[in-house]
Each structure stands twice: as C-alpha cells, then as structure tokens.
Amino acid sequence: MRVTNNMMISNMLRNMNKNMLGLDKRQMQVSTGKRIHAPSDDPVAISRSMKIKADLSELEQFKKNVDDATSFLETTELAVKDVGNALTRLRELVGQAANGVLTGDDLVKIKGEVEEIKSQIISLGNTTYAGKYVFSGKKTDEKLLDNNGNYLINLRDMYDPATVDDKIKFEIGVAETIEINTLGFEIFHNLPLGGDRIVAAGGQADLITQIDDIIGHLNAEDFGQLTGSLDVIDEYIDINLTARSEIGAKVNRMELVSSRIADTNVNFKSLQSQIEDADMSEVIMQLLNEENVYRSSLSVGARIIQPSLLDFLR
C-alpha cells in the first residue's frame, strides 16, 4: 500500500481532532463537575438520570399538593374549632337560662348573645381559604349558607366511593390520595353515617334551626324546653369534636407524608449525584493525560507537516 504525504497529514489531523475532542470532554467535566453531558457519554446512565429527574419533578408536585392540603385542613380545623367554642358558650348561656332564676332583662341579654352566636356560626360556615369556601364541597366559589342559615348549594357525600360527590381529593403520592374537605352538613347538620348523605339548597342547617328554637324558648321563657335543648347542643358538640379529630388526624398524616417526601427527595438527589457527578480527582488526572496526548500529537504533527519536496531539492 502506497502511503502519500497527503494521507499522513489527513490521518494526523483526524487523530489530532480526536485528541482535541477527548481534551474538550475532560475540560467540560472539570468545569461543570458533571460526568455526562450527552446520551453518547453513557446511554444507560443518562436514561437512569432522566428517570430520576422525572421522579423528582413528581415529588415536587406531591410536595406542593401536601402543603396546599395542609393549609386547607388547618384553615378548616380552625373554623371547626371556633364553631365548637361557640357551641360551648351557647351551652353555658342555655344552662344559665334554663335554671329559671334569671330576670326578664337577663333573658333578653342572653337572647342577644345567642343571636350573635348564631350569626358567628353562619359566618364560620362561609369560611374561605385562598378565596375558596372550605365547607362548600367542590363548589368552592359559592357560599354555604345565607344570612338565615339556609343552604345555598346542594351537597352530596355518597356511600359508594365510585359515585361522584362533593369530596375533594388530593394526590399526595403514587396511587395515594386524601380527602381534604369537610362538607358543611358534617358540622351544621346531624345526618346518620353509613349511607348516602345529601342536603339540598334552600333547606336550613339543622344547627341553625336548633338555635332558632332556643331563641323562641327564651322569648317564651319555656325553661323546660331550654333544658331539653342542652342535650341537642351536646350532640352538636360531639359532632364538632368528631370532625376536629378527623381533621387533626389528616393534618398529622400530611406531616408524615411531607417528611417522607423530603427523605425520598434527598435519596433521589443523592442517587442522581452518584450517576451524574464526576470524580474530580480522577477527571483532573484524565485531563492532564489528555493534555499530554494532545501536546504529543501537536509535536508529531509538526514533524509530519514540516518536510516537503523543496526540502529535498535544496
């Protein structure tokens, strides 16, 4: 095989370019601290890295969902707690009035405070979080109660989980969801458990009806009925405590899920670092080696290019 000067120069340039690519690759690794920058660097590793990045993005969304759910639950919990405090005060007032020893003026004062408690409970029924009504189910842009304590919307809690109802569910993990909202009738109505629970717009919340009855008993000075109202108030206090315990359990669960997401996030980032990050001591050593190889190729190339026909004709 005849080797020409042009062939030698072409091979030299090709090999020199190959050495330059190797040097550029090591310089890129040193400057970025990353071992891989393109799929060709390590196809298997880049595939694993892309999967981890997708998982991290998914975790980030789960974290946002958990934070939003926690804030929603805490707002609901505070509103339910305030309703409970109002009920406790209502019971104290009714207990005082039921004794039958207060004067007419005292009963008028109690009646005035009971009416204020009614207004406060109605106001709490329309509690909002970030502009959304927390007790209105999926109709978060609509109030739950009007000024008289009547439902402004229809609410449904269906026994069959496959049936669409007003429960809002947040995805907080892979195939893991949580119901974040408490429906208004779970606080202001005494509906039995174990079946479909539905209230219709236009009907008055049962708790408000009971307070109206108490106001009527105060007007009539019917102390026997006031005494009977204490048991009804106790029922709603129990309903309130049950709701608060359920919401509190969900808040605690959100804290655990948030902690788990944080731990998983750390683990994924550590694994991503192991896959992508370069071993700097090794890469610097390889960079120095590539520099030596490139300098050698330049030196050899200078010798190959230098001779010409004119050099032999001198």
Image: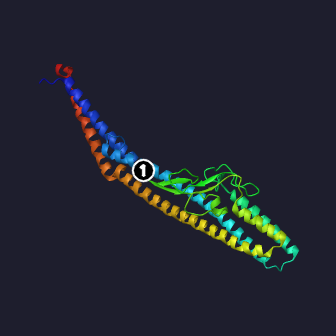
Mark 1 crowdedness (10 Å alpha carbons): few <14, some 14-19, many ≥20 = some
- Judging depth in this view, the residue of 26 and 108 nearest the camera is 108
Q: Is residue 125 left or right of residue 51?
A: right
In the picture, which quadrant includes the C terminus?
top left
Location of residue 12 (image quadrant): top left
At 85% across and 74% down in the image, what residue appears? 106
- Judging depth in this view, the residue of 70 and 227 nearest the camera is 227
Q: Is residue 155 above or below residue 252?
A: above
Q: Is residue 1 above or below residue 71?
A: above
- Residue 184: x percent and y percent? 65, 58
At 65% across and 66% down in the image, what residue appears? 81
Which residue, given by chain and number where applicable, does mark 1 sit on? Answer: 55
**Residue 113 can be seen in this image:** no
Q: Is residue 238 left or right of residue 110?
A: left
In the picture, which quadrant includes the N terminus?
top left
Q: Identity of the amino acid at label 1?
A: Asp
